[in-house]
Image (cartoon, rainbow, N blue to C red):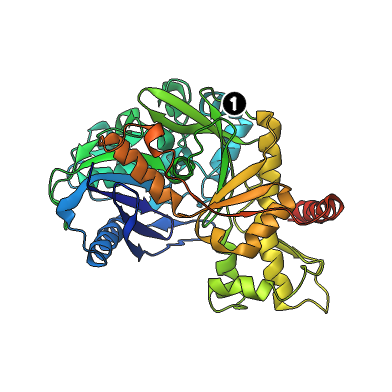
Amino acid sequence: MPGIILSVDQGTTGTTVVLLDHELNIRAHGYQEFRQIYPQPGWVEHNPDEIWDSVLGAMAAAFSASDVSPAEVRAIGITNQRETNLVWDAASGKPCYNAIVWQCRRTADTCEQLRQAGYEALFQQKTGLLLDPYFSGTKLKWQFDHIPGLRKEAAAGRVVAGTIDTFLTWKLTDGHAHVTDATNASRTLLMDLKSLSWDEQLCSILDIPQEVLPEIRGCSEIYGHTKNVPGLPDGIPICGMAGDQQSALFGQACFQTGEAKCTYGTGAFLLMNTGDKPVPSKNRLLTTVAWHIGGKTTYALEGSAFIAGSSVQWLRDGLQIIESASQIEALAAQVPDAGGVTVVPAFVGIGAPHWRSEARGAITGLTLGTQRSHIARATLEGIALQNVDILKAMESDSGRHLLRLKVDGGASANDLLMQLQADFLGCSIVRPQIVETTALGAALLAGIGAGMWNGFDDIAGVWKEDRTFIPEIEEEERQSVLKRWRSAVDKA
């Protein structure tokens, strides 16, 4: 069935809009960055109006770069930075405060108090998550505790809350739809993982008024239709929605239990499809919803490294040893190894499976012979080695040995990084032809929701391989690198 799918990929530093046709040929891209706001150390915010402006700007750029007319758009899919959330006026849509970003660590003390009160086991049992500032629940609690008059406004029904998918759907429908999907809801610390509903006990513990929360829906259904959106006709269905990492898992066609992917973006995010039952983690990984389609839920194990591509930005902007991110591969390739240097990119703490929010970045093994190229290579190694820790924990929890890992995201184009990942993991790394699988997943979900495809069988053949990276080092060398890495992590 002909028609164009508009996929909105709302990320941490900018918004990408991709226009795809029924054969999933990418007809055009549009991209627009927005500000990162750092009110104090460890705090990260976004201006929600600037996020919305970036969506409109990216859409306009995509249409202007193609021969596609907005009238050809049959469906809209949304994927988004997941744990970032905000509260806004239910009548005007005006934000009550900046969006608090997933990277923000302001609620570390709150999480520690909840742990000390003995709540972590309850939260993990019900939500599959750990008590960490990463997740939305304590961010939302902070807003209700610190924004004057917010609880009174909530009691009067004058404010609503949600993650970025909820905010964008609200804006696209001119306030007619206040919804989220099960994947984004599963990142809030507020949703019961089995019933896919807001949990009254958890909302009470975090003192969050449940009435401000959106309706939880599936990942591929009609949530509402466009109304008064600049540059788009009214009446286009918004009918695909998933958090960015689940969207990438879907876009990578990881439809079978045991298939896994890693997305290299600002952070690195690994998800493994675990089938129709949630798998509790004994290694401090996250149990999450992969997708909920047609009344059926698929679950995943997830491990996140908070810093990946942003460590390359640090080399560019902080240390200024490269002028652009694309230069790191050539610089790192100037040396055969890192010369004993190890970079632990724990700039905002260490995520799974360690979960040490107090950890900070470290460089070890420096000598008078250390050059820029060694630090560049060690930074790439640090990105890859974080993922080894996560994947080994994932294998332990799932009882499955990973034979190959599908990869995507901007940094997956770095051949040296992908080879290092294969070497350190000891498994094949498979890169698809379309590395923008986050946007692709949202497009596939929207296409199913709009009836452009009948389901999994129709889209299973879409995924095409670009290149496979095979391990090139021996086990003895691999273990030596891992030993050096674990020693450095202990010091971070």
- 77 or 357: nearer the eye? 77
Left or right: residue 117 compared with residue 12: right
**Residue 194 appears at what percent x and percent y?**
47, 21
Picture residue at 14% right of the left edge, 52% below the top: 71
**Residue 341 appears at what percent x and percent y?**
78, 66
Res 281 quadrant in image: top right
Give above or below for 198 relative to 62: above
Q: How many labels does the image show?
A: 1
Judge whether residue 232 can be spotted in this image: no
Give above or below for 300 relative to 444: above
Picture residue at 76% right of the left edge, 57% below the top: 472
- Determine crowd level at label 1: few under 14, some 14-19, many 20+ residues with C-alpha closer than 10 A: some
**Residue 11 appears at what percent x and percent y?**
41, 54
Which secondary structure, mark 1?
A: loop
Find disc 1 in the rendering and name its residue. Answer: 279
Residue at the farthest right position: 476
Picture residue at 39% right of the left edge, 48% below the top: 440
**Residue 169 appears at what percent x and percent y?**
26, 43
Left or right: residue 234 compared with residue 261: left
Quarter the C terminus occupies: bottom right
Q: What residue type is labelled 1?
A: Val
Picture residue at 48% right of the left edge, 32% below the top: 289
Left or right: residue 363 compared with residue 271: right
Quarter the N terminus occupies: top left
Judge whether residue 324 can be spotted in this image: yes
- 317 or 235: nearer the eye? 235
Residue at the farthest top position: 195
